[in-house]
Amino acid sequence: MKKIHLVVLLLVFFSVDTFAHSQTQNTVVKNGIGLGSVIAVVISWSRNESILLAILHGIFSWFYVIYYFFALKEK
């Protein structure tokens, strides 16, 4: 994985952890934007650069992340 991908993933993890106790973050997560969706969209965009595919992979969230890890990751 490229360094920029790792930096983006680390920023996502730190931002979720930092704002986890605020009311806004809890509301956003309850309404459907989860960590799996964010990771799936970032991976999809970095591989395909297609908004339609990024949205589709965001809907499948963790399923796409696991699929990417086992079947599609760069060597």
Image (cartoon, rainbow, N blue to C red):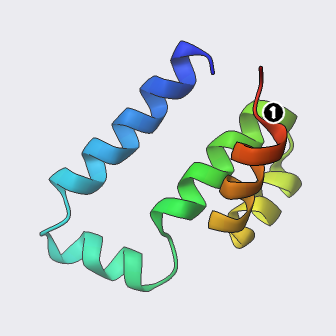
Identify the image quadrant of residue 26: bottom left
The quadrant holding residue 23 is bottom left
Does residue 41 appear left or right of residue 24 in this picture?
right
Please identify the quadrant where the N terminus is shown: top right
Location of the C terminus (image quadrant):
top right
**Frontmost residue, 69 versus 31:** 69
Q: Residue 21 appears at what percent x and percent y?
A: 12, 69
Left or right of 37? Residue 13 is left
In the displayed image of the protein, which residue is found farthest to the top? Answer: 3
Q: Position of residue 67 (x, y in %)?
A: 77, 55
Instruction: Establish if 19 lies above or below 10.
Output: below
Which residue lies at the image location 53% right of the left edge and 19% below the top edge?
A: 4
Q: Is residue 70 visible?
A: yes
- With respect to residue 19, does 68 lie above or below? above
Residue at coordinates 67% horizontally, 51% vertically from top-left? 41
Query: Which residue shows up at 87% across the image and 56% down it?
Result: 52
Which residue is the site of mark 1? 47
- Vertical position of residue 60 compared to residue 45: above or below: below
* Residue 49 in sight from this viewpoint: no
For the point 39% across and 44% down, which residue is it? 12
Question: Does 14 sit left or right of 50 as displayed?
Answer: left
The number of numbered discs placed on residues in the rendered structure image is: 1
Between 61 and 69, the one nearer to me in the picture? 69
Q: SS of the residue at dot 1?
A: helix
Amino acid type assigned to the residue bearing label 1 in the image: Arg
